[in-house]
Image: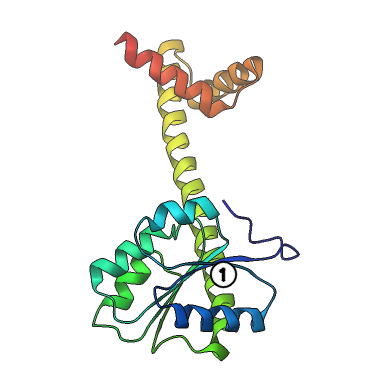
Amino acid sequence: MPKLTAMSKQLSIIVVEEDRDRALTIVDSLREAGDFDIQVIATHTGLARQIKAHQPDVVLIDIANPSRDTLEELALASGPMERPVAMFVDQSADGLSGAAIEAGVSAYVVDGLQPARLKPILDAAITRFRMFQRMRTELAETKKALEERKVIDRAKGMVMKARNVNEDEAYAILRKAAMDQGKRVADVASALVTAAGLLS
């Protein structure tokens, strides 16, 4: 996944634009806004494959009047969970902005791409992407911790029953086994629960 934290590194941007003149306008605006490594993709065919090949830091999509299917297809093809995606549309039907955000688009701008607004919108898209990425990471870590807690509790229950000890003593037994094996308590607990499942 591209690292957006290294600001000394030249930011790579893929511009998805079928119209050559509009693509040139976008590229010129980006060049005025900063020192970017810019690639233009002129066709939506094989977009996911092309983006994967380039591994850009940001994807900028300019589309005149998207349908819901086109919008979701473009958003998903651009890898919104891996990088910020900014989408510029001339017109937008009801509900499309919500669909774009749900598909992972970091910035959805209606009323077309205006050169003066390009850099601040890209900055906002990158900031928003980082924020959501942080939230996803924290949520995944919290879910993992909860799952591990459940497994440890099950393993403690099994040790309490097998050894006729209280909860603290059961945890101490698990912790000692983990230390002896150079593993985490959650890993030892998981192995115990799995083994017990195989034996029952």
Could you say which quadrant of the image residue 172 lies in?
A: top right
Q: Is any part of residue 117 visible from this angle? A: yes
Q: Secondary structure at mark 1?
A: helix
Using the image, determine if residue 48 lies above or below residue 121: above
Task: Give the residue drawn at x 45%, y 42%.
Answer: 146
x and y, in percent, of residue 128 in the image: 52, 70
Q: Nearer the viewer, residue 156 or 14?
A: 14
Colour scheme = rainbow
Using the image, determine if residue 58 lies above or below residue 149: below
x and y, in percent, of residue 65 in the image: 29, 81
Callout 1 crowding tier (Cα within 10 Å): few <14, some 14–19, many ≥20:
many
Using the image, determine if residue 70 lies above or below residue 66: above
> Viewed as shown, does residue 85 lie left or right of 67?
right
Q: Is any part of residue 119 visible from this angle? A: no
Callout count = 1
Q: Nearer the viewer, residue 2 or 44?
A: 44
x and y, in percent, of residue 166 in the image: 48, 22
**Given the image, on which type of amino acid does mark 1 rest?**
Ile
Check disc 1 and report the residue beneath it: 126
Q: Nearer the viewer, residue 12 or 117?
A: 12
Using the image, determine if residue 30 lies above or below residue 13: below
x and y, in percent, of residue 111 in the image: 38, 89
